Image (cartoon, rainbow, N blue to C red):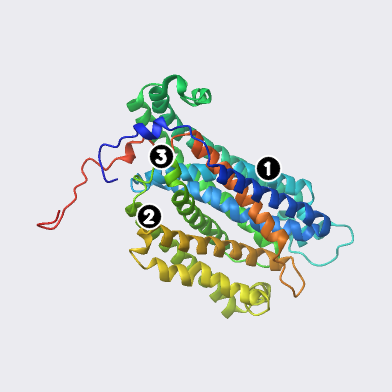
Amino acid sequence: MATRNLDFTQIIASTPRSVPAKVRLGALVLVVVGLLAGGYGMVSDANRTFTAFVFNFMYFMGIAQGAFMLCVAMSITKARWGRPLKRFGEALFLFTPVLYVLLAAFFLLGGLDIYEWTEWHEPGFTEFVPHHKELYLTKPFFIARMLGGLAVLIGLSFLYLRSSLRADLGVAAEALGDKAPAWWGKFTGGWKGAEAEAEAQANFQMRIAPLIAIVYAIVFSFMAVDMSMSLAPHWFANMFPAWYFMSCFWSGLVWMGIISLISRNWLGIAHLLTGNIYHDLGKLTFGFTMFWGYTTFAQYLPIWYGNMTEEIGFVLLRTTVEPWATMSKIVVMCCFLVPFTMLLSRGLKKIPPAYLSVTGIIAVGIWLERYTVVVPSVWKHDTLPLGFIEIGIGLGLLGAMIMVATTYLSKVPPVPINDPFMKPHPDEVHVHPSGAH
């Protein structure tokens, strides 16, 4: 941070605040579009609709939990540079319970029928199936892994979130007095004072953060294998799970940049979200852009030169068969070539419209990447199934995510106000050239 004495008086005084009417209306319209797309899809082509849900679920769950993992990472590393962004990671995380409910509905409606391996357990099926895959890929075990693993991860994340809010809401409640919302009391019971709570809650977050990181890696690895890889049950790639949960963290960084840039003036925190913060966020985003490119090629290369039947088909379908070959080229452009070129610029990362444009390109690119990984495993026609169903469901989930995130940001202080890591380290020294002012 640029200053050692931060004044949060105005931020506290304006909390809670109203979500702009245009944002509420726009989010509601997107949700309605999503409901119409889902309803139309279930009537016209249920399998296509279920497939559209799978890749959209993996995209938005990655954003929601991936953004929260930056908060977790900052606690583990005691990072100070990105603390003003912390509340945005929490806001996006609150979309995970919504996605969890939708995933449960997907299972109840028979969404697993799009998975080829469900036929293995039907009477009369005689094709050879490896015994270990037959044991692993069963509906009850699949559902238990997904719902159970996500429940543990979301539960641990909520403990972190509650601790983060407690330190801030207690200070804000003291300042607001009777104007403080009554529900804040559920977080601030037994309040011990600002300094004691700031230290206690920061220590708790540092203790639980490594556990969340480990559970995140495990659960999202299972999600990559189960929800995506098992759509082509005879294909596998050892790096695929790590590639997925890494790219989820990357998509979280991207959307934290988008949401914070768009809403910082409404929240009255533009003076805290400085160009230096976006420069640092941009460098981290740039690093993961390169890592995505490296891990993508690192998976492609051994499959290509190994030319093994069970692996090469997955790659050939997406790189040599139309329309998937063109889509794969677009993904590489949006996820690597364009952002790599643009984020090389130091100045671009500090210019809000420019940085917003590059994050927007990456956001679309990752959505298309999820689409290209998932859909060809199910869609067996020579057309491109990218229409009202796929885009509409995506827009609906986007609207719901915006609705959840902005509602949360409107109800609590939009930046940490009682976090010891919001201030520079007391031993930090800035050295300037002679004669500099």
Disc 1 to disc 2: CB gap under 8 Å: no
**Image position, residue 400 (x, y; %):** 62, 46
Disc 1 to disc 3: CB gap under 8 Å: no
Q: Quadrant of residue 312?
A: bottom right
As drawn, the residue found furthest toward the front would be 21
Q: Which residue is mark 1?
A: 101
Q: Is residue 117 above or below residue 102?
A: below
What is the spatial separation of the Cα atoms under label 1 and label 2, in whole angstroms? Answer: 34 Å
Q: Earlier in the sequence, mark 3 or mark 2?
A: 2
Q: Which residue is mark 2?
A: 278
Q: Earlier in the sequence, mark 1 or mark 2?
A: 1
**Image position, residue 165 (x, y; %):** 46, 33
Q: Which-is-in-front pick, marks 1 and 3?
A: 3
Label 1 SS: helix
Seen from the viewer's position, the closer of residues 304 and 196 is 196
Is there any visible trace of residue 270 in the rendered image? yes
Q: Assign the N terminus to one quadrant of the image.
A: top left
Disc 3 to disc 2: CB gap under 8 Å: no
- Amino acid at pointer 2: Tyr
